[in-house]
Image (cartoon, rainbow, N blue to C red):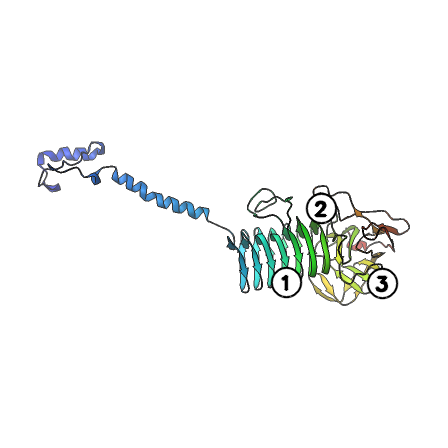
Amino acid sequence: WGRGEGPGQAADQGQSQDQAQAQDPSQVQPPAQPQGQAPDSSQEPDQTQDQAQASSQPQDQTQSEETESSSAKGLKAAADIAIADGKFTIDAADDAIHSNANVGIMGGQYSLSSGDDGIHADTGLSIAGGTIDIAKSYEGIEGSDIAISGGEIHLAADDDGVNVSGGNDGSGGGGGPGGGDMFSATDGALAISGGYLYVDAGGDGLDSNGSMVMSGGTAVVNGPTDDGNAPLDFNGTFEQSGGFLIAAGSAGMAQAPSDDSSQRAVLMTFPSTLEAGTLVTLTDSSGKAIAAFAPAKTFRSVVISSPDLKAGESYTFSTGGKSSGTEKDGLYDGGTVSGSTKVVTFALGDTVTYVNESGVTAANAGGGFGGGGRGMGGGQGRPGRGTSTNGQGTQASPSSGAQSGASNSASSDTSNAT
């Protein structure tokens, strides 16, 4: 329109032409500028398109950032997590409690379920108190270094119960949820100096790609039923100087504490797999029960380490029967055992004694898959089937030499064997 005219003041003769141009956007011409005035760049036709593109960019960036930061973890931190008290109920598709650095738990009550780790720390993980119940997990507790000095822990894991492995569980491949190299070697350690730990694991019960140390506390392990895993699995050494340990499970890769431990231990391999709930009793020469344990799953081996074990004394393994003691997690305290069947009587060695139904035997220096301290094909610290003549067996020990052990062998209760 011309100078002084508005939208409704256009000449009648130009109206039809304007309507035709409006129907075809490509033919629309910008309005004529008054003489002496420069064109207004704000009226350029590309402005609307540019504004639309600009306004869409922040939204796209926000959506991208939200996608990248999504997480299925329950309680997580990029740095340390330290908890002194509180009550936590967490059901997470990923780790229930996760830190990219360290986790320290000094107290509190925890009911955890996880699609990956119950508690995970990329570096150090320390538990000094609290009541922790991990009802479901792929791996129960995982960190590069794990120290348990107090508290009461119950955990169930599809794979490893307590796992000392290397670093971030979100990198690498293999293994299961979270990836990670199942054969990676680390300098980390599992150290147990107090508290109560109960493990029910489909994979390794206590697993360290480095070493293990136990100086106090109680550890009860229901380990795997397959021979590809073990109740105890360590690549370095397992030095035990105190505390009470009992671990049952498969026999193919079973390990016992190392020979340089100051506390005695015994690893028993049974002639056949025993049913879940079968009572296993270790008694001394007076009939006192050192340990009475009914594993929750089928098993063929059991390792016991107790301050009550004395070198040179006679002990007997029996299976079946019932205990009148107080039961907790399959472990009986006090009372007497009746109706059991004797499997073997043997003399305990100076360090770790390996026993089968025929008597004392030697640790197997040959190899299982992923053997302790020797990588794939190692096997140091694993039991051998051994041989026995007239009830006599020998044990090789670096500190004591060959030892003889008298054996009174009896068949196990066949009603409790498969």
Q: Residue 127 appears at what percent x and percent y?
A: 61, 60
Tell me the amino acid under the disc marked 3. Ser
First along the sequence among labels 1 and 3: 1
Q: CA distance from mark 2 to mark 1?
A: 30 Å
First along the sequence among labels 2 and 3: 3
Q: Which residue appears at 91% of the width and 50% of the height? A: 390
Tell me the amino acid under the disc marked 2. Gly
Going by the picture, which residue comes out furthest to the right?
390
Tell me the amino acid under the disc marked 1. Glu
Q: Which residue appears at 54% of the width and 53% of the height? A: 99
Q: CA distance from mark 2 to mark 3?
A: 35 Å
Q: Which label was assigned to residue 112?
A: none
> Which residue is identified by label 3?
285
Q: CA distance from mark 1 to mark 3?
A: 33 Å
Number of other residues with Cα within 10 Å of mark 1, as a class: few under 14, some 14 to 19, many 20 or more: many
Toward the viewer: 210 or 205? 210
Instruction: Answer with left or right where residue 238 lies relative to residue 361.
Output: left
> Which residue is identified by label 1?
152
Residue 196, image quadrant: bottom right
| Marks 2 and 1 in Cβ contact (< 8 Å) | no
Instruction: Answer with left or right where residue 194 lies relative to residue 291.
Output: left
Q: Residue 80 appears at what percent x and percent y?
A: 53, 56
Q: Which label was assigned to residue 373?
A: 2
176 over 283 or under it: above or below: above
Q: Residue 362 appears at what percent x and percent y?
A: 82, 48
| Quadrant into which the N terminus falls | top left
